[in-house]
Image (spheres, helix red, strand yellow):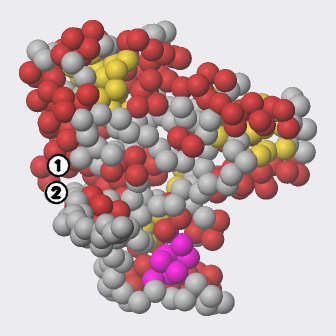
Amino acid sequence: MTTAQPQELDVQPTPLALLLLGREADPRSERGVDCPGELPSPSDPDLVARARAAKEKLGDKVFVLGHHYQRDEVIQFADVTGDSFKLARDAAARPDAEYIVFCGVHFMAESADILTSDEQKVVLPDLAAGCSMADMATAEQVAECWDVLTEAGVAEQVVPVSYMNSSADIKAFTGKHGGTICTSSNAKRALDWAFEQGEKVLFLPDQHLGRNTAVRDMGMSLDDCVVYNPHRPNGGLTAEELRAAKMILWRGHCSVHGRFSLESVEDVRARIPGVNVLVHPECKHEVVAAADHVGSTEHIIKTLEAAPAGSKWAIGTELNLVRRLANRFAPEGKEIVFLDRTVCFCSTMNRIDLPHLVWTLESLAEGNLVNRIEVDKETEAFAKLALERMLALP
């Protein structure tokens, strides 16, 4: 009896696999980029004092933006907090600030660069702070999708609508093809506008926000929606399916909001009688349908601000924000818990930590410009066109 010897397989890892393993870099991607320079040690007890001193030295030359999902250690140094679009607009409203330090992720810093003046410099404390959702749609994939729509004979009927959580390249594609940008707050207004321009919408890159807005807010059916998968030939769709659809949803999602499930909702209702379930529209459709309230990050905050004392809330959004809100409203007797039993931060948001912020502020204070995010002029022009269409929405 002989034993078969294992054969060596000549398997070459794909570029995507190398990227995910951290062994390769794609300059067009929001991941896999090293942060240059020597960072302070996370255990340095003087980090807070160092950040404060550097920020004071810079004075009005620096404006620090903090997204709601950032760590508390970073948020304490933010001049303003908010969601991605609010922060980009806040940056544009401060033309005297030479440096805009964006404590968020890559696409947010790109939006800030698009909306601010050429004299202002947008800085991201860690270049590896990307967004998995934004990475799910590349310029090449979207161009190929448009070719598929053209071959199916429907491209002329399609208006692209891209979520703010997308790269500058995707925003530029949207502007170039007559579309608009949307946020989670104004997605319905953006879709209403788009359907006045054409018969179909290509919604990028978050399928859940597109589906929830179309079905929950606009009265469409699930059958009106199809999902375009960029990793399958022709998006995995037939020409007939594309012709019949009203909403062509890109197969993308938020890795944080996508983890919430119907079981999460049922479990928290069983554990906490009388709880109000409040979720972000990036959650899956069945989660949104089972929730009591649905809305953007800003909507979630305002809802909890207006909630009566003693009320109970389970929140389906990023944990840093949920924990901050729970602490903020605890003195009012409001019980606020994370919707899922399993704790989950946004891993890329959490790349921006106090050592990276200290290194950034101290570098700028010493006259060294680091980690600048700069969108090329052609991309900026078309992306800005799409953003301006959003700003002009009724």
306 is within the stretch colored magenta: no
Pick out the residue farthest to the front: 1
Question: For the residue marked with disc 2, what is the amino acid?
Answer: Asp
Residue pointed to by mark 1: 379
**Residue 320: x, y in percent?**
64, 57
Residue pointed to by mark 2: 376
For the residue pair 366 and 290, the one nearer the viewer reads as 290
Image point (43%, 79%), residue name: 360
Please give the range of residues in magenta: 352-359
Quarter residue 252 falls in:
top left
For the residue pair 209 and 310, the one nearer the viewer reads as 209
Q: Are marks 2 and 1 in contact (CB under 8 Å)?
A: yes
From this view, report whether residue 271 is shown above or below residue 255: above
**Residue 205: x, y in percent?**
35, 38
Q: In the rendered view, does 314 fall on the left or right side of 248?
A: right
Main SS, magenta residues: helix
Question: For the residue marked with disc 1, what is the amino acid?
Answer: Thr
Quarter holding the C terminus? top left
Report if residue 323 is visible in the image: yes
